[in-house]
Amino acid sequence: MIEYGQFCPIAKASEVLGERWTNLVVRELGAGSETFNDLRRGLPLMSPSLLSARLKFLEAAGVVERSDSGKRIRYTLTEAGRELKPILLALGTWGQRWAPTRFEPKDLDPSMLMWDIHRSMKADYFGQHHTVLLFEFEDYTSKHRRWWLIVERGEVDVCMRDPGYDVDLHILTDVKSLTAIWLGQITFAQAIRRKLLKMAGDSQLKKDIHLWLGTNYFSSVKSVNPVRI
């Protein structure tokens, strides 16, 4: 644990939140992840042992509550944890506006990107229709190349393996371009015009991609350091 040896409330708060990964764990919990596996999917580069340690630390600090139903263990934010939401949103807004964004390979992660997209997608657009969307990253040759999003009854699931359903829309892009779209650095129209985003399949889904895919919460914040794609 970081210790500053000061009574200042900023210092005391930083002792709780200043450790590496801590704010991102709180971010994931605030976004609705409750199980260890779901937290791992939102934090794919964080080791299981470190995640476990951070959860125990946050529980001891009164930020996280752990409950065991006998079938699964759930982690939720306490009142103190929920009070951090506007603070993290303000931090994200500052980061979107002022932090340099270069989209270097080390910052691009298809796992995190697709997990973020799946939980923020406008599922209501699809009504009661069973819809299968295939995202293919042409800059990847590994198991991370293809991702399926399955929409049904207002729920969105993300799969790394072919679920065996007919695909309604096939989207071909690269991780950098889709990340730039997701963060509002370029628009869907610009990406399509420049062939950074290519689609095959249902014509209405293609036309309305900006409506159902949407963008990240912070995408409306204009960056002073925009990325050239």
Image: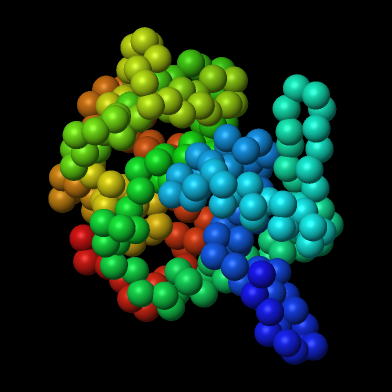
**Residue 229 in picture, x, y percent from top left:** 21, 60
Q: Residue at x 44, y 20 (%)?
A: 131
Q: Is residue 24 left or right of residue 219?
A: right
List the single residue furthest toward the left. 194
Q: Position of residue 56 (x, y in %)?
A: 72, 52
Which residue is located at x 73 percent, y 42 percent?
Answer: 75
Relative to residue 125, is residue 1 depicted above or below?
below
Q: Position of residue 168 (x, y in %)?
A: 34, 19
The answer to whether one can see residue 188 in this image is: no
Please name whichever residue, 221 or 43, is drawn nearer the observer in this view of the structure.
43
Q: Quadrant of residue 138?
A: top left
Q: Is residue 217 above or below residue 3?
A: above
**Image quarter hosting the N terminus:** bottom right
Q: Which residue is located at x 21 percent, y 39 percent?
A: 140
Left or right of residue 115: residue 188: left
Q: Is residue 81 visible?
A: yes
Q: Is residue 149 depicted above or below 41 in this figure?
A: above
